[in-house]
Every structure is written in structure tokens, then in C-alpha cells.
Amino acid sequence: MQIPFYGRYIPENEESTLIRLLKTDPLHSDGAASRRLQGLFRESFGCEHILLTPSCSHSLELACRLLNLQPGEEVILPSFNFPSAANAVLLAGGRPVLCDIDPRTQTLCLADVQRKITKRTRAVIAVHYAGLSCDMDALLALAREARIEVIEDAAQAVGAYYRGKPLGTLGRFGCYSFHSTKNISCGEGGALICGSRDVRAAQIFRDKGTNRCDYLAREAARYTWVGVGSSPVLSEVSCALLLCQMQAVREITAKRNTLMHAYLDVLRPLQTRGSAELMHIPDYAQGNGHLFYIRLPSAALRERAMALLLGAGVDARTHYVPLHLSPMGEKLGYRPQDLPHSLHTGDTLLRLPLHTNMNESHIRYVAEILKRVD
Ligand SMILES: *Cc1c(COP(=O)(O)O)cnc(C)c1O
């Protein structure tokens, strides 16, 4: 049996929606597809404002830019992460400060965040790894007390909840990804979620530094250059593809969650006998089945498990090289043992295939192979 790592969900109405779009004019941003998509997001997840961008990376850059960081100001983020959030801090003129993760969830370790807060700290970026967050009430309380902002890197968390609240809507900014590897996708795409306090500044930047948003709202007769800006917009073609996916978000999430729970059920004996630790879902979380991972007792056993799976046609994969171990992390002055949990998770975590083209017989097949690892 061959089980690929990713599999695209193809909505039934995709082709007809695209064909209809091709007959509309004009095709630039804020057209019918993006407006319907924004409406659907607001309806589904209760976000106040949403700007569709070319990627989660662009959304993180916009969020960090809107903080108006001064040179030397710091933003804390976890080392076990993709580089986008760290790049966003650097591009906005700030200093990324890497912190460790909680080995139960692979998300921010709150005690380490607390230790790393200085008078120069402006924000913390929470990465919802695998669609699961840290204890957001505790993080928000800590941030309030320290007077710093919370940005959610919710790239993996579309359709996931913390105590019933949609992830991506809890901090000052939330950033989603619609990259092909994510639950809801249009190849490349992203979104910035924000409140009324930030939306105007975000729109001005997104509209090439103009007050085009006032013009569209009929609050200005013409529009003009009012600030620094660029054009991080998602094309209408991508919006149309994404709209079809969003219309199926409940179905996609339910299917992925079913597969995630099937993995948990069939792999439980591995955890009982100490051969692997399964992904942990905290009580406060309602996940979105974005990915499924196990952690092996050592790096050598991880390699062995991965080789066995690949040999049997199952595309299993490691994940991030922790940022503090990367050449850039080294340049920023980090040593491997500075963040021991990130180091260990980077060495031992293994992701198993999980997508909507799979069913429970695939999960049982993967489990049979993993039973041979010891
Ligand atoms: C996928 C991902 C990103 C990057 O998303 P793009 O849309 O490709 O820019 C950033 N952060 C995390 C945690 C991700 O999983």
C-alpha cells in the first residue's frame, strides 16, 4: 500500500466556481470571491476583520509591522517552529527571542516566556502546533500583566478551538495559512485577523499605502498616498478556490479529526508499553486534525520507525529543525542546550500521513508497521 503524506481535498463545486469567476470583471482584489470569503470567515469563526493575504508569512509580517517595533525591541516566539514568525520580527526591525516549548503540546512553555520577558519585550507569538494551542487564558493573563501583545501564528489552526473560541481570534492579531499543506488551502494563501483598532492601518499598508478603504466605503471621493505600504493581497482566483474549501470546512475538519482519533485509538498500546508517546490533546482543546505525530524515545528509534514506514510505502516525516539550531539561530547566539525541549522534540518527533483522501484502513496499516519498532 502507498500512503502519501499529503492529499488535496477537491470540493465538488470547484470547477464550476472557477469557470463562473472567469466571466467576471474586474478580477482584482475586493471582488465578489474575496467578499464572500471574508463573510464566510466572519460567520464561521466570529472574527471581527479579516484581510486575505498571499501567505501566513505575509500576515505575520503585517502583524509585526503594525506593532511599530523600535530598534532593540523584542518579540518572544518558540524555537520549535517554521522561520516565518522570526523573519517577520526581523523584517519589522525587532529582535526575535526564542523560547522553549512544553513537551506535552510542543507549544510555548509559559514559564520560559515569563523568564524571557524584559523591559524591551513588546509581544509574544504563540504557534498553535498541530492545531492545538497552549493554555491561552494563562498566556493572555501573562501578556496583560506584562503589557505585551499576543500574536497567534494560527497557520495550522483554521477550524480549531480553545475552550470553544476559534484559534486565531484570541490575540491582537491572528495569522492563518492556506498553503497546500494546510487543512483549507488554495495553493498559496493567508489571512490576517484583527480588531477595529488595527484594521485601518492594515488596510492602508495592504492598499499600497493609500486610503483606498475609505474610498470603497464612500468616505472619500478619491484616494491618495497616506503612508508606507505594499500589496500583500490574495488574488481573486485563489479566493475562489479557497471559498469552495471554506464551504466544506466542517466536513474537512470532521474527517481529519476522525482520522486523528483513529490514530490515537490504534496506537495506544505503543504508549502503554513505552515505545512511543502519542500526540496529546489538552482538555481545553478542540483540534482540527491538522497533523498527527508521535515521539519516539530516541533519535535513533525515530530514524528506524521512519525507515520502516517508508519501506512499507507510508510517507512519514520529521518536522522543524528548531530555529535555535539553524545557521540563523547560531548567528543570533543560541547553543543547542539553551532550549532542551525544542532540541529533543526536533530529534524525536515523527509525523504520520493524515489527509482527507485517507480512511481508517490506512490508519490500521500504519499502526501494524509501527508495532514492529522496538
Ligand atoms: C505553514 C506555516 C507557516 C507558513 O505559512 P505560509 O502560508 O506558507 O507562509 C508559518 N507558520 C507555521 C506554524 C506554519 O505551519
Image (cartoon, rainbow, N blue to C red):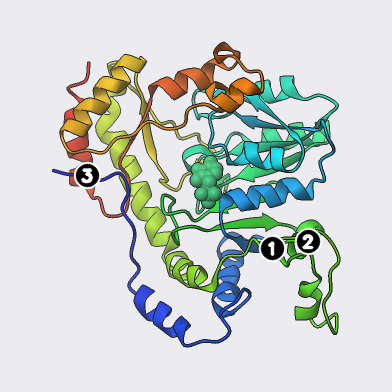
Q: Position of residue 284 (x, y in %)?
A: 54, 39
Residue 321 in sight from this viewpoint: yes
Which residue carries the number 1 mark?
49
Marks 3/1: CA–CA distance: 39 Å
Asked whether disc 2 touches disc 3, contact meaning CB atoms under 8 Å apart, the reply is no
The three-letter code of the residue at mark 3 reads Ile
Q: Position of residue 348 (x, y in %)?
A: 39, 21
For image coordinates 34% across by 20% down, the residue present is: 296
Q: Residue 292, which numbered label?
A: none
Count residues near mark 3 (Cα–Cα under 10 Å), then give few for <14, some for 14-19, many for 20+: many
For image coordinates 37% across by 31% down, the residue present is: 318
At mark 3, the secondary structure is: loop
Residue 255: name its quadrant: bottom left
Which residue carries the number 2 mark?
196
Which residue carries the number 3 mark?
3
The three-letter code of the residue at mark 2 reads Ser
Marks 2/3: CA–CA distance: 45 Å
